[in-house]
Image: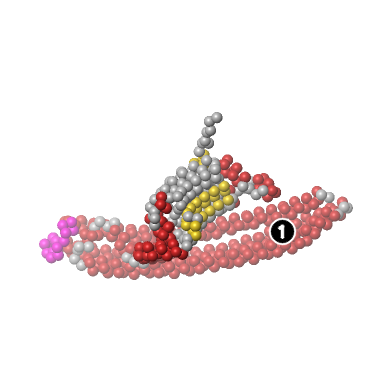
Amino acid sequence: MIWQQDEPKVIDEEMLHQAVEEQAPQGQAGKIAKGEGVKYSEVLHLQLDYKNILKIYHLCHFTSLTKLQLDNNVIERIEGLENLSNLVWLDLSFNKIKVIEGLDTLVNLQDLSLFNNHISVIENLAALQNLQILSLGNNAIAQLDNVIYLRQFKNLRTLNLAGNPICDEEKYKTFVTAYLPDLVYLDYRLLDEQTRKMGFTRYQYAIEEMQRDELQEQQAKEAEKINNQKLQLHKDAFVEFLNGPQLFNSLFSDDPDAAKLAHLPGMAALLESYKKEMEALCMQIFEEGLTQHAQRQAKVESFYTCSREALAENQQKGVQIAADFESSWRQTLVEIQQITDHKLLEDHVSSCNKDINKLSETLRSLEVHLVDQLEDMIKDFERNISDMVGGFIENVQGIFAQCRDLENHHHENQLEIALATLEKVAKNELEEEMPDDVIMLFVDKDTVTNAVSASHDTHLLKIDNREDELLTRINSWSDGLLKSLHDEEVKRNRRRISEISNYISDLRIQLDMKLSKN
């Protein structure tokens, strides 16, 4: 008899369904789970070992998964795990993986096993800052420098590298201990104090230098993070890059004649004055933007706080009403089961139905009251936001109008200088030396006038575009926010009405079940 190995497989729907069913709860709970079907999004643990899996597919719906077992397969590449951000434990041991990759979204991972694969470089783990246990034994890691990469994982306490070529180096253990001082277990053994001291003594100076470099790198990252946070705040306020010369500089970035006209006599002082005044106007927009953003955010937070309080109060009333009803309802059901007289039973059932209808009306009235309350709150909030946005837009448009006036004034002065220079060139009275390409502008009045006018048009277009961008974005934010509030309230109301209907239906079913037993 010739033994044949199973063909490599891809994770498919049949395999997943079978695995979930096999791992479902046992007993009555298991029967219920099988009857209703288990939602992949609710599965916490998934065991797919010894399945001869070659490719990882179809795991995108297991968004709640915390433990995934994929060991003892023939997997060649780590992929398809992007949506499993809740994973805490991942076993990919005994596969054929050559490169560490595809783990960037697993930010909650604490325990990772890549034991017995074909990995030669420790890399692409930077996102796993919660990593505590890492098993890379029986791979092809040959360079001790790979250990230095692991210094970034401040929570790493257990590391297994046994069975790699680096373990054959005489200094392996002291090197690992020195560069990973917080490590507790290495290759299944507790690290002793003597080994730590030897490692520290041997690599003290190299580590101190590395620590200085790491400190500088960390400080640079923190500075970059702060700058990015500030930039995001400025973007949220719609005034990014308006707190400096950026707008002024942009006026000239796509102006081919700007550099030429800058050589004209008196232009240096004119440009410096223009820049200073433009920056001052931009700063007004910037400061107004940040102030208005803070006020809008305060208004938004106040609205959500008030709406949450209204919802909580309404929910508490609903719960109390239901609790009061059920306290007597249970006794009513017991009494019904004990009634033997047919006429008395009909009267009792009629009374129960009236009570259920009354409860339904009470709960629905409570919901109607909440809808009216939230609608008034939303209208008031919408009015406030519209007023705030409208006031900000009016102020910003006024300042941008001043920017255009400033550009017009600059244009008039520049044209005056250009025409005066043209006259000097024509009379050969120009004392200042200018580049040949600048002199070419002064062949006649039309040429120099067109150059100055084109420059002016470019500047006005840049100012208009920045204004349009700001207005478009803040109006889009306002419209989107208000639409989302209305949409969320409609969805909430539909959910609540559905909950009430289901609750009332359950009560009627309870009543029918009791009647069926009589």
Say which residue label 1 marks.
361
* Relative side of 133 to 142, left or right: right
Q: Residue at image x 39%, y 50%?
A: 142
Q: Residue at image x 40%, y 69%?
A: 287
Q: Residue at image x 58%, y 51%?
A: 45
Q: Nearer the viewer, residue 484 or 145?
A: 145
> Residue 500 location in percent, x, y?
68, 56
Q: Nearer the viewer, residue 156 or 359?
A: 156
> Residue 344 location in percent, x, y?
86, 54
Residue 427 highlighted magenta (yes or no): yes
> Residue 497 location in percent, x, y?
66, 55
Inspect the image, locate mark 1, and give the three-letter code of the amino acid beneath it. Answer: Glu
Location of the N terminus (image quadrant): top right
Q: Nearer the viewer, residue 432 or 87?
A: 87
User: For residue 210, which quarter of the picture?
Assistant: bottom left
> Residue 10 location in percent, x, y?
51, 40
* Relative side of 486 to 292, left or right: right
Find the magenta span and give its range. Answer: 424-438
Q: Is residue 436 visible?
A: yes
Residue 206 highlighted magenta (yes or no): no
Q: Residue furthest left?
A: 428
Q: Name above or below for residue 57 compared with residue 393.
A: above
User: For residue 488, which quarter of the picture?
Assistant: bottom right
Q: Name above or below for residue 271 compared with residue 10.
A: below
Helix, strand, or loop for circle 1?
helix
